[in-house]
Image: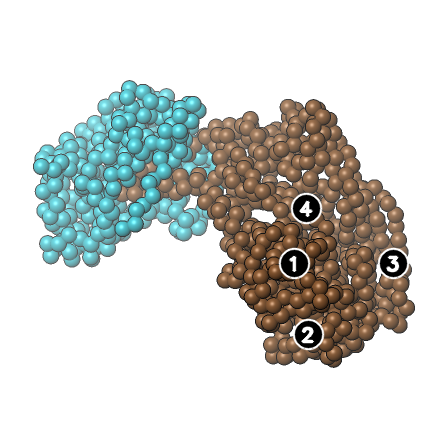
């Protein structure tokens, strides 16, 4: 078979750890895309970080051949933060394998991903995985999935990606159940950029799904939204390494080496077309995702600022959802205010910056975006607590609908946590006899502050969690400032609910008093809401700091001691007249993790 | 014509025993080796003497325990050293007999620095000192009887087991003897030493108490009419240790003996501590093995600042201005820690308690080293 009819484009979606990557590996093996010798665990997860955390961050596309068909498998991340990446990948597909762990059953992200696939009009092929596990209950899991997607239970595939049992049936089902792509091979070429990466030597590499027409190597192309023109230096597909090919045909998934050196000139979501015979209409773009969590990123050594800027620029190419803009903090110097899809996304960006770009970073406490109406009636969106006006008419904060699935014994713990976090009960469901789905409306800010760790520890790790942003609601929110010797420390300002302000202020002040070394003068440490001080401590001045004796033989050593003391000062950040070690900022910014 | 060196230091490393906290270059016993070592010192002096002024301003015999050196060799050394206005010898109390005191007088010694350290028997035992409190007092009177009118006492505080009241008593005892000069040091326990290992926990407790000790020392000694002329040193009017003042003023000095340090015309060198290497070289008419450091003018200025700020008299500002961070000076003046007076820079009384931190503030960043 050839042409569109022989092509299938599909994704695998699953809750984290339900075996998505293992299934992808097994598919490469069964289709002999890779020999066993070449197999490594989780071939598709190429980033070091992905291997270490066992999660998939970036979507990857790989072509395999099965019974005369070309199957393009687009791997997707499973975590809630990456819903956007999943949605981009899904847009390039006609179907999705929905993988569910036979021992765990449906989890929160199973639901979220299944709904995403259905919203994108994809054919969902449900697969119950890990049937080899002793604690597996394939029949129960299959029943849950069948109910979820509205299939009969006998249509649910039961496999073990680990042993390979049933994997061939999965591939057969992909061919039988998922429709071939419906593009027009004769129309002017159009391809959707669903992802991209940056190659040091070859520039921007776009991952594309050809919709109509074809591209040829050396063809001159144009990105329709950005207007960027370039030549297709190389076309190809992944199997799973790059395999160059002279053309990309309608319906196929592959890559285009653009040679572009400027990462901002080709955006994910854009449509590529030929310069000579251009398409008239671009493909519908992806929905524009808005970052929900913001934090300031500052290099610990201010000399690294240009390196941080370059690194963010490069990451941005691989990660269209990353948002950043320059920020200047009195306390921390030059850095960037960055927007993330969630906390895990933030953690991953930070780790990639530190590992792949060898940067040492200070990250401020994460916050959400606030809508503010000032006393003068002006409307603002505030991404940084330091920019929150001290006098406001109204503040609105983002709310989420949180879905938590837990064994029923933990329902009370989750309810307790959610009510501590200003949550409103919405409803409850029973996906199975043993498990309960709790739906709550919560301020997103409460999730950003140490929620995952709490949820995990209070449910012994049995809870699965997912959320959607549902809109903004007004709240009694105040800006809490920290002052050292009367000078506000902009990097430590927080926006908190009034009821929690005293406790947060007290905790901040106590921690700072412990962490900031005594200075040459008394340093008052205060937490304030506007002009009202809500907590105060004093770091008493040192009374003695001398080198005891200093005679002929000691002079060199003593001088070096002083020079070292001087150098130590240089590593400190100066806030007004107070020297604050990096560690103090880190300790305060990590306060979240210590909350019991 | 180069400037002549006016200060001579002579290191006599021999001790009866080694005190647990000591980190000087010392050799225990070896009485049979004293003559050879004195020969070595005099040989080194012959190699270096051309740089010395005549007469010298000061000579200082430090140790080790200079007064543990066998009397005949000590006398031979003293008679062979060049004349100076101030000749100081460090002495341990148990070595000071009427005979030794007389020998020192005869040898031209003008000043004795007596290592009392404490008057509490239990604290002296912790320090592994040989002398008890009575021996300290006896030594002091032997020196007075021999005619010494310039005696300094060393005290140490922060000793494991010490309480503030103990320090008060030590200070009172020392002042009661009426020395012309007092040096009060905090105990510096070096990491990795036997002493630190034995007293770790108690040393940490003492470190927390040092602020109070230091304040008590200054209040008590100044209250008794002494001048607090250097961070750790106090004197009756006109009785500063002129030799040490030379260091603090940034003067050149020549040091003889193993481990001794010299600074002459922007070169600082330290003789290696090996006795055999030292004796072998000087016997062959060669300079002993040593490590050298070239002091760039900028480094010399920083040292001048660091040392000068230890004194109660202002440093002429023009000499150190280039080493001072102007902004920091403004801040320190505002905090009442440093001041410009009489055309010089000095720390205020409170600034002197924080001398290390204030000096580190005031020191300008060193210019980036150019690649060689």
Residue with the mark numbered 1: A278
Indicate the quadrant containing the N terminus of chain B: top left, top right, bottom left or bottom right.
top left
**Residue A533 drawn at (x, y percent):** 64, 26
Tag 2 and tag 4 share a subunit: yes
* Image mark 1: chain: A
Q: Nearer the viewer, residue B320 or B268?
A: B320
* Image mark 4: chain: A
Residue with the mark numbered 4: A291
Sequence-wise, which precedes: disc 1 or disc 4?
Answer: 1
Asked if one can make out residue A119 in the rendered structure from this viewpoint, the answer is yes
Which of labels 1 and 2 is toward the front?
Answer: 1
Q: Which disc number belongs to residue A431? A: 3
User: Chain A's colour?
Assistant: brown
**Inter-mark Cα distance, 2 to 3:** 36 Å
**Could you tell me which secondary element the residue under label 2 belongs to?**
strand
Sequence-wise, which precedes: disc 1 or disc 3?
Answer: 1
Check the image and report above or below for A174 versus B120. Answer: below
Q: Which disc number belongs to residue B233? A: none
Residue with the mark numbered 2: A64
Residue found at the very far top of the displayed protein:
B342
Sequence-wise, which precedes: disc 1 or disc 2?
Answer: 2
Asked if one can make out residue A516 in the rendered structure from this viewpoint, the answer is no
Residue A336 sits in quarter: top right
Sequence-wise, which precedes: disc 3 or disc 4?
Answer: 4
């Amino acid at each position: 078979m050839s042409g569109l009819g022989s092509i299938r484009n599909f994704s695998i979606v699953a809750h984290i750890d339900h075996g998505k990557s293992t299934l992808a590996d097994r598919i490469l093996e069964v289709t002999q895309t890779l020999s066993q010798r070449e197999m490594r665990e989780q071939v598709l997860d190429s980033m070091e970080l992905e291997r270490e955390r066992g999660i998939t961050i970036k979507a990857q596309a790989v072509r395999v051949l099965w019974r005369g068909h070309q199957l393009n498998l687009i791997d997707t991340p499973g975590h809630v933060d990456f819903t956007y990446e999943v949605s981009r990948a899904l847009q390039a597909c006609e179907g999705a394998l929905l993988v569910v762990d036979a021992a765990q059953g449906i989890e929160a992200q199973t639901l979220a991903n299944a709904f995403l696939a259905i919203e994108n009009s994809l054919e969902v092929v449900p697969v119950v995985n890990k049937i080899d596990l002793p604690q597996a209950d394939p029949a129960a899991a299959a029943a849950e999935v069948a109910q979820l997607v509205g299939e009969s239970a006998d249509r649910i595939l039961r496999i073990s990606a680990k042993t390979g049992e049933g994997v061939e049936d999965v591939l057969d089902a992909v061919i039988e159940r998922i429709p071939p792509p419906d593009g027009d091979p004769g129309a002017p070429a159009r391809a959707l950029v669903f992802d991209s990466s940056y190659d040091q030597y070859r520039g921007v590499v776009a991952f594309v799904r050809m919709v109509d027409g074809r591209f040829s190597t050396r063809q001159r192309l144009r990105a329709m939204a950005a207007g960027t023109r370039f030549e297709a230096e190389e076309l190809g597909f992944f199997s799973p390494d790059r395999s160059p090919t002279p053309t990309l045909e309608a319906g196929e998934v592959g890559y285009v080496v653009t040679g572009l050196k400027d990462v901002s000139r080709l955006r994910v979501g854009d449509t590529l077309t030929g310069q000579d015979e251009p398409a008239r209409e671009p493909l519908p773009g992806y929905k524009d995702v808005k970052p929900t969590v913001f934090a300031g990123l500052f290099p610990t050594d201010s000399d690294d600022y240009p390196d941080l800027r370059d690194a963010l620029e490069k990451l941005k190419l691989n990660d269209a959802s990353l948002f950043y803009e320059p920020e200047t903090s009195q306390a921390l110097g030059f850095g960037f205010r960055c927007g993330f899809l969630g906390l895990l996304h933030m953690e991953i960006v930070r780790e990639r910056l530190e590992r792949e770009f060898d940067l040492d970073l200070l990250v401020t406490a994460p916050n959400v975006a606030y809508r503010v109406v000032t006393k003068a009636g002006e409307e603002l969106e505030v991404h940084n607590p330091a920019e929150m006006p001290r006098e406001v008419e109204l503040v609105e904060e983002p709310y989420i609908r949180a879905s938590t699935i837990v064994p029923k014994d933990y329902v009370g713990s989750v309810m307790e946590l959610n009510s501590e976090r200003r949550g409103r009960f919405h409803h409850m469901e029973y996906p199975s006899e043993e498990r309960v789905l709790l739906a709550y409306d919560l301020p997103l800010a409460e999730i950003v502050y140490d929620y995952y760790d709490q949820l995990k520890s209070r449910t012994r790790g049995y809870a699965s969690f997912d959320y959607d942003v549902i809109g903004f609601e007004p709240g009694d929110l105040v800006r809490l400032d920290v002052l050292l010797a009367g000078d506000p420390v902009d990097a430590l300002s927080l926006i908190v609910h009034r009821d929690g302000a005293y406790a947060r202020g007290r905790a901040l002040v106590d921690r700072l008093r412990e962490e900031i070394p005594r200075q040459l003068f008394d340093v008052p440490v205060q937490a304030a809401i506007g002009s009202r001080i809500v907590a105060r401590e004093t770091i008493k001045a040192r009374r003695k700091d001398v080198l005891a004796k200093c005679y002929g033989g000691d002079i060199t050593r003593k001088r070096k001691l002083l020079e070292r003391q001087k150098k130590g000062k240089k590593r400190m950040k100066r806030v007004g007249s107070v020297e604050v070690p990096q560690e103090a900022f880190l300790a305060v910014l990590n306060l979240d993790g210590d909350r019991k | 014509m180069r400037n002549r060196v006016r200060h001579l230091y002579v290191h006599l490393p021999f001790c009866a025993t080694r005190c647990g906290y000591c980190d000087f270059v010392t050799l225990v016993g070896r009485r049979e080796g004293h003559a050879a070592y004195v020969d070595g010192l005099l040989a080194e002096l012959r190699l270096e003497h051309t740089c010395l002024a005549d007469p010298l301003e000061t000579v200082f015999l430090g140790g080790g325990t200079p007064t543990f050196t066998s009397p005949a060799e000590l006398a031979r050394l003293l008679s062979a050293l060049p004349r100076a206005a101030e000749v100081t010898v460090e002495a341990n109390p148990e070595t000071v007999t009427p005979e030794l005191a007389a020998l020192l007088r005869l040898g031209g010694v003008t000043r004795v620095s007596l290592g009392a350290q404490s008057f509490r028997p239990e604290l002296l035992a912790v320090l592994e000192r040989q002398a008890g409190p009575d021996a300290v007092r006896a030594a002091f009177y032997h020196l007075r009887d021999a005619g010494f009118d310039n005696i300094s006492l060393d005290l140490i505080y922060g000793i494991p087991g010490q309480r503030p009241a103990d320090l008060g008593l030590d200070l009172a005892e020392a002042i009661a003897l009426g020395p012309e000069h007092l040096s009060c040091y905090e105990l510096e326990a070096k990491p990795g030493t036997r002493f630190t290992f034995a007293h770790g926990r108690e040393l940490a407790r003492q470190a927390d108490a040092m602020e109070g000790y230091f304040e008590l020392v200054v209040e008590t000694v100044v209250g008794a009419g002494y001048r607090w002329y250097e961070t750790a040193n106090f004197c009756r009017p006109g009785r500063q240790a002129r030799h040490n003042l030379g260091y603090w003023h940034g003067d050149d000095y020549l040091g003889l003996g193993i481990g001794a340090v010299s600074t002459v015309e922007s070169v600082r060198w330290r003789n290696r501590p090996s006795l055999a290497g030292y004796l072998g070289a000087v016997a062959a008419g060669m300079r002993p093995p040593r490590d050298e450091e070239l002091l760039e003018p900028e480094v010399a200025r920083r040292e001048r600042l660091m040392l000068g700020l230890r004194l109660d008299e202002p440093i002429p500002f023009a000499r150190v201005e280039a080493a001072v961070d102007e902004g920091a000076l403004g801040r320190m003046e505002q905090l009442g820690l440093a001041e410009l007076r009489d055309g010089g820079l000095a720390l205020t009384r409170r600034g002197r308690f924080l001398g290390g931190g204030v000096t580190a503030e005031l020191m300008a960043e060193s210019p980036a080293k150019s690649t060689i």
